[in-house]
Image (cartoon, rainbow, N blue to C red):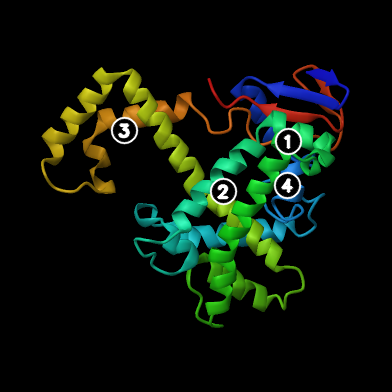
Amino acid sequence: MCRTIIGNFCFLNSARLVRQVFTNKEIELVSNDRPKMFTAAQVMYNFNDVSFSDQVNNIYWLKMRKLLHSTVMFYGSGVENFSVQQITGEEQSPDSKVPQMIGDFAVCAQKILTPTVDSILSIFPFLRFLPVTYYKELFGNTLKCRDMLMEEVFTKGKAKHVPGEPKGMVGSLLEAQMKNSNDWLTDDHIRAMLLDIIAAAFVTSTELLKSFFLYMAHYPQVMKKIQQEIDSTLGHRSPSLDDRRSFPFMEAAILEVIRSTSNVPLGVWHETREDILTDGFCIPRGTVVRKQNCP
């Protein structure tokens, strides 16, 4: 627990404390709000997403979360084939720019979401307007990449949408918008939810692969053993998810990488709505709470 000129911060460094603060039935309702982050306000369409918003910042948050979960469960159940096509509903050509757009946005989003950058911009938002500064350049590039991606994924998808014939997640969200007579589900809500989906489905996967390759470079003996297991079991045929049970060592290596690394080492920010008493300590109202995801 630390007190600063910009507010109180609390860091949870054990799995027991994390479960106690965030999942305990007595206090979970007052420990899971989100602070007013700069990125959530400026990049995620003014708190209109699910990941970086809450019931305080977005009165439709519960409806959005239910809609987002049902959409992802319907289209994301086939993990083996999860791709851009499940979002747009259209098969991507080899020269499609969407994967590159996703990558460009991911790079900018990861930079602007770092605690140092987001905290500074939350306190001094005018920095995004100062010429010849890192913050102005980063903010401008982030919005540019976001708008280009949404133009390709959402705007064009909406133009091609045929009522009653949803294609992909974009089509399903547009159908939900029509059913609700557009009384709360706006285009910005859909754009923000699509950014949530893209971040969860693609950004985390690519970062996990990078971490795995880095570990293999540092532990060539492990990489060699994985290669031997694949060659002896698979031969020359193409692999599938059904083969996972046949590769216990490779599976263990992947799980170890997931256990020891994290794309978001301190998790998504939480904010307490009321004073919380846990483990003999008092976490004051309005404290930003972060958890340590890495061992």
Q: Earlier in the sequence, mark 3 or mark 4?
A: 4
As shown in the figure, which amino acid type bears the numbered disc 2? Phe
Residue at image location 59% in from the left, 65% down from the top? 151
Q: Position of residue 7 (x, y in %)?
A: 86, 27
Q: Single out the mark in the foreground, 4 or 2.
A: 2
Q: Which residue is mark 3?
A: 251
Q: Secondary structure at mark 4?
A: helix
Q: Single out the mark in the foreground, 2 or 1.
A: 1
Mark 2: give few (<14), some (14-19) or many (20+) Cα within 10 Å.
Answer: many
Q: Are marks 3 and 4 in contact (CB under 8 Å)?
A: no
Q: Are marks 2 and 1 in contact (CB under 8 Å)?
A: no
> What separation in Å lies between label 2 and label 3 (alpha carbons)?
30 Å
- Quarter of the image with the N terminus is top right
- Look at the picture and state if 72 lies above or below 88: above
> What separation in Å lies between label 2 and label 1 (alpha carbons)?
20 Å
Q: Earlier in the sequence, mark 1 or mark 3?
A: 1
Q: Which residue is mark 2?
A: 105
Q: Which residue is mark 1?
A: 133
Q: Earlier in the sequence, mark 1 or mark 4?
A: 4
The tag on residue 29 is none
Mark 3: give few (<14), some (14-19) or many (20+) Cα within 10 Å.
Answer: few
Q: Position of residue 69 (x, y in %)?
A: 57, 57
Point out the residue furthest to the bottom here.
163
Q: Earlier in the sequence, mark 2 or mark 1?
A: 2
Q: Single out the mark in the foreground, 1 or 4.
A: 1
